[in-house]
Amino acid sequence: MNQPYPEGEPERRPDQGRSRERPRADNKHLGPRSARPSDVVHPVVVGYDGSGSARNALAYGAGMARRLARPLLIVYVTAPGVYCEPLTGQVVGLARDVESLERWLLTELDQVTDAQGLEVHVRTRRGSAARELAAVAAEFSADALVIGAARHFWHQLGGSVPTWLAKHASCPVIVVP
């Protein structure tokens, strides 16, 4: 009897017989236009403002996303109507090019951790940092929200983003020093 495959059935290629999964892309190619909001499911959200504690939070959030096999969503919030230059701190009336801001955020990620194998998304928002971060976490059903600790003593007295988020966010809030 002549069998078409003398050693049994051929090995199936990974893309045969099941739905095609969306490949995890290198973080340099991802940005807000790379994925629809419905594509980002249960991410680890990191609020980033360029401070030292925010850099620590970014590294911690990337590690958490890797361990949980979840997407990493980096969010940068600017005040409404005013834009603060991330590198110089100069206040500018009009928003800068969103794409250059996203490139800066991805560069920051590359500087604090190895993003290889992570699905990375970037969002920029305008408004209150605490409210916008809580809204993003709720919108994407975040598994966790990671932020840096308040930098100034008066934030601890008058209220801070971490304090507000701990009371109002819809997911666990992790504050990194």
Image (cartoon, rainbow, N blue to C red):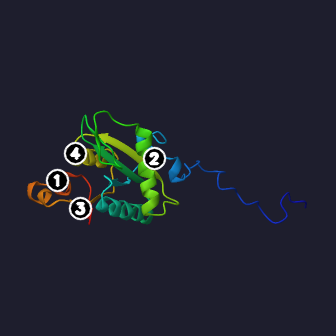
Q: What type is the residue that disc 4 sits on?
A: Arg
Query: Residue 103: which disc?
Result: 2
Mark closer to the observer (4, 3): 3
* Residue that carries the numbered disc 4 in the rendered image: 131
Mark 3 and mark 2 in contact (Cβ < 8 Å)? no
Classed neighbour count for the residue bearing mark 4: other residues with Cα under 10 Å, few (<14), some (14–19), many (≥20):
some
Question: Would residue 173 appear left or right of 62 to someone viewing this image?
Answer: left
Q: Nearer the viewer, residue 113 or 62?
A: 113
Among the two numbered marks 4 and 3 on one chain, the one whose residue lies closer to the N terminus: 4
Q: Quadrant of residue 64?
A: bottom left
Quarter placement of the N terminus: bottom right
Residue sitting farthest toward the right = 1
* Residue that carries the numbered disc 1 in the rendered image: 164
Classed neighbour count for the residue bearing mark 3: other residues with Cα under 10 Å, few (<14), some (14–19), many (≥20):
many
Q: Helix, strand or loop at disc 1?
A: helix
The residue at 16%/53% (across/down) is 164
* Residue that carries the numbered disc 3 in the rendered image: 149
Cα distance in 3D space between marks 2 and 4: 24 Å
